[in-house]
């Protein structure tokens, strides 16, 4: 290509990007080099870039490397007199302005005692700000929305003014374009009235951004690098609300709403009215937020109906500061669909003498509708007042005059076009590359995919139709010679036996390359075993996942059926729960194990090209490695799930007694929800540490699923938990876990959640437990299960020396390390 063509190409690129380049300036104040944050963003030093200017007043850099703080906070720029940063933006319009303050320790200045004011484009952001009340190791991030344009043209001027005798400092600045239509031009006032205009010069400060009922979302989880906090600290009465979670990938964005309004994580979680068992179920869920008196606030509410099964069945009221905001509101009339995102903006005045905003949702006054109400997300933004201030009643002029007279503001502006056409071309090319990279980074679809997914590269092509072929096809795991296995197990030495199952024995072996493996040797006379043997190879060859046990190879020589797996040092989950002398697992370990297993099953159901139903989920088929990472094992009974045009797979009933989905048993129709049921049994087994079926117990206790659900429905599940857990489990975490198990054990498949939903609920339960552990560390919290329950479960006496009193079929499974499934004709339940 000739030079002239290149020039034309660059020129075209320049024109394209000159039209509407998005701004994204990430500035590391006082830093000598670019630093990368945990979330992958790179902050460039504040010197040496043409788009960022710094007034030439004296300023000093201080730095210090402290443990446990972000790289951005190892340096700061310190000002002894009023100084300004000028950022030359490419776009006019609203921009996010995020300021990072961290009073790092250094030998020159005491940043904790700094008192200063900050003004951006004529808007007072901070007045007489002091970081002295920030906790140790807690940086402050302030987020604003400032208009660029008008008189300041394409510039954002950020002025820092130390108070008399003091200093000002800053660690980091972000200037990022706000997408069009992110902020409304008008909003509904509360008390209700005619819609109010919001002029573009009005600036905003983020007061609260809340992912109601959900997890903390960090900048990494948000396309616009926002943080969404959890709502628990603001709930007035935590018992009035119950959170609901859905798989985020199921959220739909109708026209007018995008992930830039809020990520799907926000819409996939909500608080709904807890079943308070009061007559008529009439109460509000309330959240209270501390705010500054005398300011107007923009309140954005995010709604998404993730609780209803039909349209027009969820109708509720919304109040702001005891005033009606929405009356008999029906989300589905706005979205015409369930699980669809919707948001609405209100403005409200916080009168002088008041310092909080109360947001409430409650049931409608209509009689014939179920009492429920939900909220998914909430943003509260302070709006600049008529003095153009976001902090008190101090206009930018009053701050200017306060600054030392001799200290006239010098604004150094460097325009990017100075270097002539060639420079423009080079910059535009660089921009082009930069934004291409940025786009690909930022616009990755935010969908839930299991972590660490490695679908077997060469194995994915194996089709299910080849199940009966006897010649092992290419890429089905490694074929091992019998002699190799013979050697690895020292001629199937009895001392190496890890367990015995109906199908044969499992040995510990060491391959020639030193890998420790589990060798499962089938009984060649079992015809049934042959089918399972093939299924296991076919399935496991297609699947590679951190939470599925991996098949290393197999051997079919000399009529043998031998499978070789990675060795799982922790053994089956069941053995770690009861019937052995292993130390009891903590609640956190149990939750992490359940989460791991749920990830494995979620991957089976949704991760591969065709969905796979395990059909034999139980505690003996969940194996643990030396780090207690859970892996799902034993795919001998697995089936490909229903295809798109089928609702189920009709098949003979197989599985393990005590874990079997009653619906599948009745109708012989298999869906993924049968695994969900079995997983529910696993959850209660983990909680109670006793076998799924224990015929030695009194009649009502024999079946753990029935027994536990009786207690769960009474709201007293804590009465029957493993005595080892008593005193260390957070009640909220336990409730969430109990609720999740209850949903899994629902009578009908379509009432049960997907494994994705189960996974989210378990993660939430874990988060509740971890917050609780942290809070006991902080202070002595009273929210724990107080004492040994009056009534001690009988399960303690089961096991002991490892000899469980269980049914025949069960005892086989007990001692095996994930042997081929125990086949049986269930006699019904
Ligand atoms: C947010 O992102 C982090 C890092 O990618 C991830 O570990 C975490 O699970 C995400 N949280 C949510 C709620 O998606
Ligand atoms: C609700 O109240 C009724 C009657 O007062 C009681 O029988 C029932 O057990 C209660 N349910 C729950 C979940 O507390
Ligand atoms: C709302 O009502 C409650 C109870 O009546 C009262 O305590 C509170 O002060 C009211 N809040 C506002 C902002 O009016
Ligand atoms: C909910 O709160 C509003 C405003 O504070 C109040 O008017 C209403 O009576 C409350 N509803 C219930 C059921 O308590
Ligand atoms: C807030 O107060 C201002 C001035 O008193 C008034 O113009 C505005 O309409 C009020 N806004 C709301 C939402 O009531
Ligand atoms: C803010 O300043 C304006 C003009 O100086 C004044 O009219 C108003 O009363 C002040 N507001 C407050 C809350 O002090």
Image (tube, helix red, strand yellow):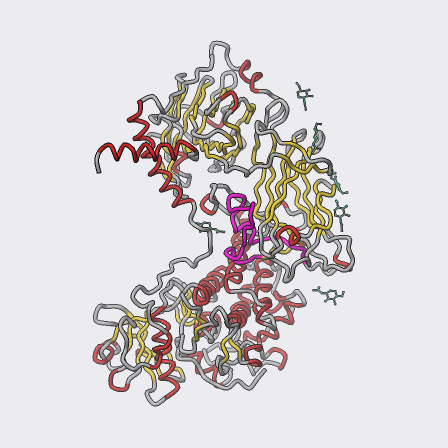
Which quadrant holds the N terminus? top left
Q: Is residue 31 left or right of residue 264?
A: left
Q: Name the residue furthest top.
A: 406
Please say whether residue 784 is visible from this viewpoint.
no
Residue shown at 35% from the left, 32% from the top:
14
Residue shown at 45% from the left, 28% from the top:
170
Residue shown at 50% from the left, 10% from the top:
405
Q: Is residue 196 left or right of residue 42?
A: right
In the foreground, 249 or 524: 249
In the foreground, 334 or 776: 334
Magenta region includes residue 264? yes
Vertical position of residue 704 compared to residue 360: above or below: below
First to last magenta residue range: 245-274
Which quadrant holds the C terminus? bottom right
When asked about the image quadrant of residue 474, the answer is: bottom left
Vertical position of residue 265 compared to residue 592: above or below: above
For the image, the number of numbered tags is 0
Task: Estimate the x, y position of residue 123 in percent, counting from the top left.
Answer: 55, 24
Q: Is residue 365 left or right of residue 181?
A: right
Task: Estimate the x, y position of residue 31 in percent, counting from the top left.
Answer: 36, 30
Magenta region includes residue 665? no
In the foreground, 676 or 684: 676
Task: Estimate the x, y position of residue 294 in percent, counting from the top left.
Answer: 67, 29
When asked about the image quadrant of residue 281, the answer is: bottom right
Vertical position of residue 563 compared to residue 371: above or below: below
In the foreground, 367 or 143: 367
Q: Is residue 484 left or right of residue 300?
A: left
Q: Name the residue furthest bottom.
A: 525
Task: Estimate the x, y position of residue 143 in percent, counting from the top left.
Answer: 52, 34
Please say whether residue 391 is visible from this viewpoint.
yes
Residue shown at 38% from the left, 26% from the top:
51
Vertical position of residue 268 compared to residue 576: above or below: above
């Amino acid at each position: 290509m000739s030079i002239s063509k290149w020039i034309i190409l660059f020129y075209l690129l320049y024109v394209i990007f000159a039209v509407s380049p998005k701004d994204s300036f990430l500035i590391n104040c006082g830093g000598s080099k670019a630093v990368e944050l945990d979330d992958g963003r790179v902050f460039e030093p504040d010197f040496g870039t043409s788009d960022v200017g710094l007034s030439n007043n004296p300023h000093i850099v201080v730095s210090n490397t402290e443990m446990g703080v972000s790289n951005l906070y190892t340096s700061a720029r310190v000002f002894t007199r009023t100084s300004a940063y000028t950022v030359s933006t490419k776009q006019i319009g609203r921009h996010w302005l995020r300021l990072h303050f961290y009073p790092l320790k250094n030998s020159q200045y005491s940043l904790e005692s700094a008192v200063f004011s900050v003004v951006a484009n004529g808007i007072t952001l901070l007045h007489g700000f002091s970081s002295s009340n920030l906790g140790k190791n807690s940086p402050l991030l302030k987020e604003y929305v400032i208009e660029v344009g008008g008189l300041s043209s394409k510039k954002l001027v950020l002025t820092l003014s130390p108070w008399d005798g003091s200093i000002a400092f800053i660690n980091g600045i972000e200037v990022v374009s706000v997408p069009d239509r992110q902020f409304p031009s008008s909003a509904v006032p509360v008390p209700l009235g005619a819609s109010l205009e919001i002029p573009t010069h009005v600036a905003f400060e983020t007061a609260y951004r809340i992912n109601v009922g959900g997890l903390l979302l960090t900048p990494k989880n948000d396309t616009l690098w926002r943080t969404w906090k959890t709502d628990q600290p603001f709930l007035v009465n935590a018992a009035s609300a119950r959170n609901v979670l859905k798989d985020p990938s199921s959220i739909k964005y109708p026209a007018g709403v995008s992930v830039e309004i809020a990520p799907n994580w926000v819409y996939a979680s909500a608080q709904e009215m807890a079943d308070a068992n009061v007559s008529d179920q009439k109460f509000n869920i309330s959240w209270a937020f501390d705010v500054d008196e005398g300011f107007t606030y923009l309140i954005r509410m995010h709604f998404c109906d993730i609780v209803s099964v039909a349209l027009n069945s969820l109708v509720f009221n919304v109040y702001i500061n005891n005033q009606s905001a929405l009356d008999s509101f029906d989300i589905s009339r706005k979205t015409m669909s369930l699980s669809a995102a919707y948001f609405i903006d209100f403005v409200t005045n916080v009168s002088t003498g008041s310092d909080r905003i109360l947001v409430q949702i409650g049931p409608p006054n209509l009689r014939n509708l179920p009492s429920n109400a939900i909220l998914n997300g909430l943003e509260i933004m302070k709006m600049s007042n008529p003095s153009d201030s976001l902090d008190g009643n101090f206009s930018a002029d009053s701050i200017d005059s306060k600054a030392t007279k001799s200290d006239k503001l010098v604004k150094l502006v460097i325009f990017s076009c100075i270097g002539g056409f060639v420079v423009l071309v080079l910059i535009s090319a660089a921009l082009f590359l930069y934004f291409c990279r940025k786009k690909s980074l930022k616009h990755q679809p935010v969908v839930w995919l299991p972590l660490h997914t490695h679908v077997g590269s060469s194995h994915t092509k194996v089709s299910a139709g080849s199940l009966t072929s006897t010649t092992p096809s290419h890429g089905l795991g490694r074929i091992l010679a019998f002699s190799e296995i013979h050697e690895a197990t020292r001629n199937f030495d009895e001392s190496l036996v890890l367990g015995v199952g109906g199908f044969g024995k499992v040995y510990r072996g060491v391959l020639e390359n030193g890998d420790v493996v589990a060798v499962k040797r089938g009984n060649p006379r079992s015809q049934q075993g042959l089918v399972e043997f093939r299924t296991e190879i076919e399935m496991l060859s297609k699947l590679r996942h951190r939470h599925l046990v991996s098949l290393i190879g197999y051997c079919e020589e000399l009529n043998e059926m031998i499978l070789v797996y990675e060795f799982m040092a922790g053994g089956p989950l069941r053995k770690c729960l009861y019937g052995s002398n292993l130390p009891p697992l903590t609640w956190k370990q149990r939750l992490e194990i359940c989460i791991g297993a749920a990830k494995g099953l979620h991957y089976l159901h949704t991760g591969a090209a065709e969905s796979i139903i395990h059909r034999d989920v139980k505690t003996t088929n969940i194996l643990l490695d030396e780090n207690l990472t859970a892996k799902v094992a034993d795919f001998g009974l697995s089936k490909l799930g229903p295809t798109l045009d089928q609702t189920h797979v009709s098949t003979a009933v197989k599985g393990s007694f005590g874990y079997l989905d009653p619906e599948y048993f009745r109708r012989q129709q298999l869906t993924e929800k049968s695994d969900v049921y079995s997983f529910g049994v696993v959850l209660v087994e983990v909680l109670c540490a006793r076998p799924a079926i224990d015929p030695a117990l009194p009649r009502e206790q024999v079946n753990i699923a029935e027994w536990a659900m009786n207690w769960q429905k009474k709201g007293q599940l804590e009465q029957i938990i493993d005595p080892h857990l008593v005193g260390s489990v957070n009640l909220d975490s336990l409730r969430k876990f109990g609720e999740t198990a209850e949903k899994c054990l629902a009578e009908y498949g379509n009432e049960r959640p997907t494994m994705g939903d189960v996974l989210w609920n378990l993660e939430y339960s874990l988060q509740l437990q971890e917050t609780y552990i942290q809070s006991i560390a902080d202070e002595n919290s009273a929210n724990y299960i107080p004492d040994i329950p009056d009534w001690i479960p009988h399960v303690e006496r089961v096991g002991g020396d490892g000899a469980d009193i269980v049914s025949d079929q069960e005892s086989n499974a007990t001692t095996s390390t994930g042997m081929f499934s125990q086949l049986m004709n269930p006699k019904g339940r």
